[in-house]
Amino acid sequence: MSTFELIDELEAGELSVEFEGEEPETVLEWAIERFSPRIGVSTALQIDGVAIIDMAYRLDQGIHVFSVDTGRLPAETHVLIDQLRDRYPGLNLEVLAPEEEHVRRMVERKGRDLFRESVENRLLCCNVRKVRPLTRHLATLDAWITGLRRDQWATRTNIRKVEIDHDHGAIVKLNPLAEWTKDEVWDYVRENDVPYHPLYDQGYTSIGCAPCTRAIRPGEADLRSRYDGGRNKTDCKNTCCANQLLRFLSDHRIIRRHEEGNKNRPDLADHRCNCGRILRPLFSKFRKRHHSRFSAL
Ligand code: SF4
């Protein structure tokens, strides 16, 4: 159990206002001081994640860093992990894994590439391989640090630098890069010679599991780099939309019917996925299927 008193919504809001306009390191320094040792940097080893690792390591060489190895990561991600360990001696990087038994049962029932079949299968795969290991790990922390930025997704425009994470036991969620743009992150990485994922140099703009990630073609939106489901076709078959929708629901805490935050939820009506589809019809489908889990918009 935590030996620290966590902050409440009011304090989180005040701190967010206080940190607005401040550099990411200011937020990190405060957070490390306040929550160590029950704080960790969560990274999917994308460009924002390695920038945060560099900043946090400069402040505290023992800072806890964690990343989920879904079992479907590209080989290049493991190369990057080795590079990071070389670059930051003694880096306290923990690689989390899904429960073997859960993966085995899922693969036995639906096949290893189940995500190619339907949105539901993709969500199941992500849940077993990514969400559950992350959730399990977050239960051991009082605060976690992410590389989220407001310019990444339409649903992230309102993220604050200090938040209470109601999806994970009301621990504190810190987004030190919230104000930065993608270019600022890349400038930081280049100026500080931070190792970055080799696939960026092959046209990838977002990197996750190997079968669900590909390089984008000229003119495609950044998100097309992900959630291709291994189809390698022009049509994303709604998998990116499903992910965008779930992010929207999660960001605005409207997954559960009576959850706090519903009052101020934004309207989904004009909200589009980065691939251009309007999300509302997809939400209607989800709501019918998971009636008890989704609140009405
Ligand atoms: S990104 Fe693809 S392979 Fe990775 S966990 Fe999700 S569905 Fe499975």
Image (cartoon, rainbow, N blue to C red):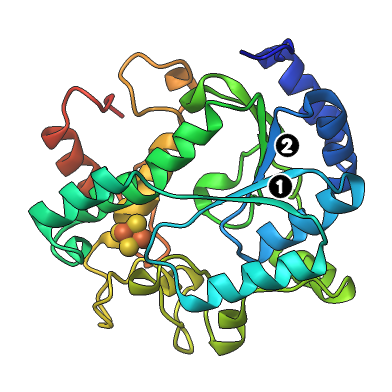
In the image, is residue 210 above or below residue 288?
below
Q: State the image coordinates of residue 218 (x, y, percent, origin top left).
A: 48, 89
Image position of 207 (left or right of 282): right
Q: Give SS at disc 2.
A: loop
In the image, is residue 81 above or below residue 179?
below
In the image, is residue 54 above or below residue 212?
above
Reading the image, the residue beneath label 1 is 178
Quadrant of the image for the C terminus? Answer: top left
Q: State the image coordinates of residue 64 (x, y, percent, origin top left).
A: 71, 42
Image position of 226 (left or right of 236): right
Q: Looking at this view, is 50 or 102 the one in front?
A: 102
Reading the image, the residue beneath label 2 is 161
Q: Residue at x 39, y 52 (%)?
A: 244
Q: State the image coordinates of residue 253 (x, y, percent, origin top left).
A: 44, 28
Q: Amino acid at mark 1?
A: Ala
Most extreme residue toward the left, as rendered? 109
Can you tell me which quadrant of the image ligand 1 is in? bottom left
Spatial CA distance of label 1 from label 2 is 6 Å
Q: Looking at this view, is 283 or 83 the one in front?
A: 83
Q: Residue at x 12, y 36 (%)?
A: 289
The part of the image, by quadrant, that contains residue 31 is: top right
Q: Badge 1: how crowded within 10 Å, few (<14), some, or many (20+)?
A: many
Q: Amino acid at mark 2?
A: Lys
The part of the image, by quadrant, that contains residue 198 is: bottom right
Q: Looking at this view, is 277 or 130 the one in front?
A: 130
Q: Give SS at disc 1.
A: loop
Asked whether the residues under the numbered discs 1 and 2 touch, taking CB atoms below 8 Å apart as contact, a structural biologist would say yes
Q: State the image coordinates of residue 225 (x, y, percent, origin top left).
A: 44, 74
Image position of 28 (left or right of 199): right
The part of the image, by quadrant, that contains residue 32 is: top right
Q: Residue at x 35, y 50 (%)?
A: 129
